[in-house]
Image: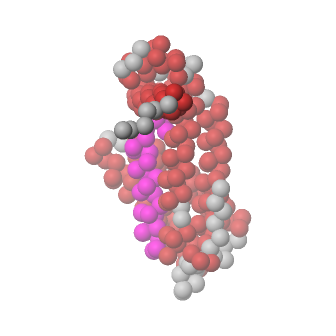
Amino acid sequence: MPEAQSDSDATTARPRRRQARGERRIAQLLDAAASVFSEHGYTAASTNAIAREAGVSPGTLYQFFPNKEAIAVELGSRLLASWHTAYGEALTAAHLQLPLDQLLDAVLDPLITFNFENPAFNVLMHGPDTPGHVATEHDLLHSAMLTRVDGILGAYLPGTPPADTTRISKTVFTIFKGGLDLILAAEPAERDAYARELKTVLYRYLFPLTEHVCDDGPMPPSEVRIHTP
């Protein structure tokens, strides 16, 4: 005969079930917020619109988030964590063995894809009214990305003075951000073409800089030291 569940076991199980339901509800609300922010922007979005998109009452929303800013902060933090993973996989020393055109594919494609799949990321990270906490986290990630790009290019262009590498890194990063804005704003049928244009611009900028690299090519990954935040 199965052993009867004790009152203590039942009490433990119920909070766990409630917690799981709460996490699902939070995820539902954040997905709805991402959709509303993407369509209307952060300023024009409202908690009522987010609740309506999620299929719940405003009262249910307020059980989890006190206001729109709290929703944006939580959504922004989760998107930043995902972006951190995406750029960490893209900006890796293993890609240094690739020819420049393949290196650009390996680095840019996952970053472009992430932005396509998460349009709310661009709204929250680059909007003029981004909540302060989100903006601060984004600035820290931006700095970390620039450091990683600097490390990648420093390894790909050995012998380049550090000050020159930093300047090149900032230029590459600025070109990427501008090109990404064009890609995201383009009609779906034109996006691949704009992505190719971005890669062409970066290739034509970087390739002449590789002419002084030794015949053995870029440093192998085992010899590269890239700062990882």
Q: Quarter of the image for the N terminus: give it.
A: top left
Using the image as rendered, state which of residue 212 and residue 184 is in the foreground: 184
Q: Is residue 192 above or below residue 68?
A: below
Residue appearing at x 57%, y 75% in the figure? 221
| Front in this rendered view, residue 49 or 209 | 49
Q: Residue at x 36, y 20 (%)?
A: 55
Extreme residue in the left direction = 189
Residue at image location 36% in from the left, 42% down from the top: 186
Percent of width and height locating residue 165: 65, 65
> In the picture shown, does residue 44 fall above or below 136?
above
Front in this rendered view, residue 61 or 9: 9
Quarter of the rendering containing residue 150: bottom right
Q: Is residue 99 magenta?
A: yes
Q: Is residue 78 magenta?
A: no
Left or right of residue 98: residue 212: right
State which quadrant residue 167 falls in.
Answer: bottom right
Total numbered labels placed on residues in the image: 0
* Residue 160 appears in the figure: yes
Q: Residue furthest bottom?
A: 215
Residue 131 in the image: state x and y as whole percent. 61, 29
Which residue lies at the image location 62% right of the left edge and 73% below the top edge? 224
Q: Position of residue 36 (x, y in %)?
A: 42, 26
Residue 175 visible in image:
no
Q: Quadrant of residue 147?
A: bottom right
Name the foreground residue: 226 vs 171. Answer: 226
Position of 163 with respect to 111 (left or right) is right
Q: Which segment is the magenta one?
A: 98-125
> Where 163 sits versus 216, above or below?
above
Magenta stretch, main secondary structure, is helix
Q: Position of residue 227 (x, y in %)?
A: 66, 62
